[in-house]
Image (spheres, rainbow, N blue to C red):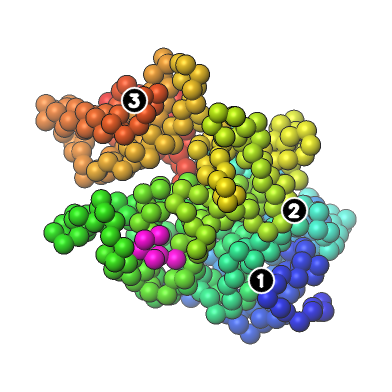
Amino acid sequence: MMKFLKRTNYFREAYVDTLGKLYDYATAFYGKRRMSDIVDAEGGYTYAEFKTKCDGISRRLTQFGIGAGDKVAILSQNMPNWAVAFFAAVPLGRVAVPILPESSMNEVTNILKHSETKVLFVSRKLFSNVSEEVLSSLTLVIDIETFEEIRRDEDKFTCDGKAMMPMPDDTATIIYTSGTTGNAKGVVLSHRNLTSCVHSCYDAQKRSKNDRWLSILPMSHTLEMTLGMLYPMYVGACVYYMSKPPVPALLLKAMRVVRPTTILCVPLIIEKIYRNSILPTIRKSRFLSWMETDMNWLLCRIIGMKLKRTFGGCVSFFGIGGAKLDTEVETFLLKAGFPYAIGYGLTETSPLLSYSVGRTRVPGSIGLPVRGVSLKLHNVNPETGEGEIIAKGPNVMLGYYKDPERTRQAFTEDGWFKTNDLACVDEKGKYFIRGRLSNMILGPSGENIYPEEIEQVINGIDDVNESIIVERGGKLVALVNFNEDAIDWNQEGEDEFFRKIEEYKKRVLSIVNRNVNRTSQVSNVEILKDPFEKTATRKIRRFKYRDTAGI
């Protein structure tokens, strides 16, 4: 067993600079404590049981010739065994390849082929997304729910697969992300990348062994993997999982059972709660209706306490990341005294770059750089003070797998990672993001137009579910999806249906153009029946809608 210094209030990076050391540390210090559980089914592990299970599976992989550097993919919904599969691989130098559970068969095929995966842990629910062609190329396929072998190819077994303790800068995982641009990238993250991010998280917001996590984001995404799996391991906390998808009714029930202290979510979740539950509550009440404009502090606090009870009554850290939070929603959360925090980062940065928590929170700001990370603006516009955020730190990726040209383009000549996010900085060093550089639209007079700012106005209109702004023929067009009960699509083609559509279009045009500047005026509104396709962090895949026409 490894020897560790007595734990203090600060992360011992010299002793936990690889995931193998984190694994040994957690299972040595917290052996008898509960590490994971399932809210609505049997399952889960103590830290000691977790180690026994991981070590046993790791020995099996070694027997089959799966050694350091070999790729081990995980295709599964969230469950305690997801972490088992991950830590059966990485502590001894194997490379984990997490795959998002909503990936199509074509995406799964491309990832497994490109990564040269040898072993696949897969859930029964997602097994049908693995093609026969891919199955025949793998050495071993394991049912992640029982850890029984589904298939194995003994002809591919070797005797030279040696497991070994990895060094901090060795590859720990390759995370494939198509982001919103459509071109899948294999982000190579080292052991140091991930452990340094755990360090940053602990420094920014200290959790303890008494905290309870409720896992609702995909573990295959860096946000949940780092802050929702590795960080609770470091502090000896327990993570609770749901055996069924976290739809609202089941999620609320799970929160009542678990009473979590720690939740990680993306902006879309809390924004929908605000617009579909909080605002209607305010508007139905004569006493509260004036609050919508005045945002009275006391009444905000009353609603905030109710919101906290909705999440189980014990939440003390509600981390929001993966996309920009609507400023109106954040203003309410701040006045309501709700314990939210903003985290900003990318898959390429493991993911955390900056945070805004506690008294440092300012609506619209992503806050200050986390410990150990340097941020600055690149190519600053002297008139606006805006520039691209670039970053340096131990959490920045090694590069894109088998793609040196794309890796080169992701960095400045002096080695700073380019985030593609345009921002400005205030006098206190807090960063405010304006929009994505790749999304920015150049106006007819050379002005910068940020579609995210226009979309924020549209998304605040009653009955609007979500929207995106696209450019067509030099003009701005709003593609809008309304809530399910706003438009009766069964009447499609009837006069009443078209009357309703035109009414909504005029309302959106009128409201948005009264609330944006002259250069951001929308010329047309098109309504889409189906919600937009999204990434794991619920960001719209914009590239798919550039030429999409609505009604």
- Label 2 sits on what residue type? Pro
Residue position for label 3: 522
Residue position for label 1: 234
> Which of disc 1 and disc 3 is earlier in sequence?
1
Q: Quadrant of the N terminus?
A: bottom right
Where is residue 496 drawn, in percent x and y?
Answer: 11, 30
- Residue at 46% x, 20% y is 443
Asked if residue 335 is among those painted magenta in the image, a careful observer would answer: yes
Where is residue 224 drawn, in percent x and y?
Answer: 56, 58
Is residue 11 rendered to the left or right of residue 381? Answer: right
Is residue 270 rendered to the left or right of residue 50? Answer: left
- Residue segment shown in magenta: 334-339
> Which of disc 2 and disc 1 is earlier in sequence?
1
Is residue 498 rendered to the left or right of residue 252? Answer: left
Viewer can see residue 21: no
Residue position for label 2: 394
Q: Regarding mark 2 in the picture, which secondary structure is present there?
A: loop
Viewer can see residue 287: yes
Mark 3 vs 1: CB contact within 8 A = no
Real-space CA distance between mark 1 and mark 2, rounded to the nearest whole angstrom? 18 Å
Is residue 359 placed above or below 118 in the rendered structure? below
Using the image as rendered, state which of residue 464 and residue 59 is in the foreground. Answer: 464
Where is residue 483 drawn, in percent x and y?
Answer: 27, 44
- Label 1 sits on what residue type? Tyr
Other residues around mark 1 within 10 Å, as few (<14) / some (14–19) / many (≥20): many
Real-space CA distance between mark 2 and mark 3, rounded to the nearest whole angstrom? 43 Å
Mark 1 vs 2: CB contact within 8 A = no
- Residue at 13% x, 59% y is 286
The quadrant in which residue 160 appears is: bottom right
Asked if residue 318 is among those painted magenta in the image, a careful observer would answer: no
